[in-house]
Image (spheres, rainbow, N blue to C red):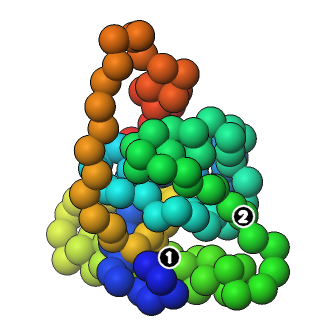
Amino acid sequence: MRKGRLVGQEPFFFDKVAGWSDGEILSAFVRQFYGKSVAPAPEVLLSEELPETELTAEWLSTLAERRVQVVAPQRGAKRQFVAMAEANAAIALQNRLLSRDDRSSSSSRSSSAPSACLACPTGSRATTSRTSRGPSRWARWSSGKTAG
């Protein structure tokens, strides 16, 4: 979503997240998605609070070189945007599972179902710069737990 319009959609599937909370999965997704030179919007809407929301906002603000808010709206239009993303994610997961079922029934190989799916709008490129002070708090954090 950019300026209230859906500008693109890219599904993300994670394996090996058994035992992770929804917040941990979202956090891993945010680090992977925005770690790939995608410029964060001024406000990032999520379905729930992250375990480290303030740290995530600080990291995204550094990437964007401006203030970025990380919000888990509970009601209103922003919550409707999140609900739409959740519905899109459910459809993408269903399509992926059906596709895997079709492939496994037509071949002798079987694959495991993904544990989580996230749908997120695609964005534009961003650049980051390093400082001579060594890795910042977010740099150490962003190299932490990731989903496979």
| x 27%, y 70%: residue | 104
In the picture, the quarter occupied by the C terminus is top left
- In three-dimensional space, the C-alpha distance between marks 2 and 1, rounded to whole angstroms, equals 17 Å
Q: Is residue 99 visible?
A: yes
Nearer-N-terminus badge (2/1): 2
| Residue linked to disc 1 | 89
Q: Nearer the viewer, residue 55 or 144?
A: 55
Q: Residues within 10 Å of mark 2 (few under 14, many from 20)?
A: some
Q: Nearer the viewer, mark 2 or mark 1?
A: 2
Looking at this view, name the residue that lies furthest to the front. Answer: 66
Looking at this view, name the residue that lies furthest to the right. Answer: 75
Going by the numbered disc 2, the residue's amino acid type is: Ala
Q: Is residue 74 left or right of residue 128?
A: right
Asked if the residue under mark 1 is in contact with the one under mark 2, i.e. CB atoms within 8 Å, the reply is no
Q: Residues within 10 Å of mark 1 (few under 14, many from 20)?
A: many
Mark number for residue 72?
2
Q: Secondary structure at mark 2?
A: loop
Going by the numbered disc 1, the residue's amino acid type is: Ala
| x 20%, y 63%: residue | 108
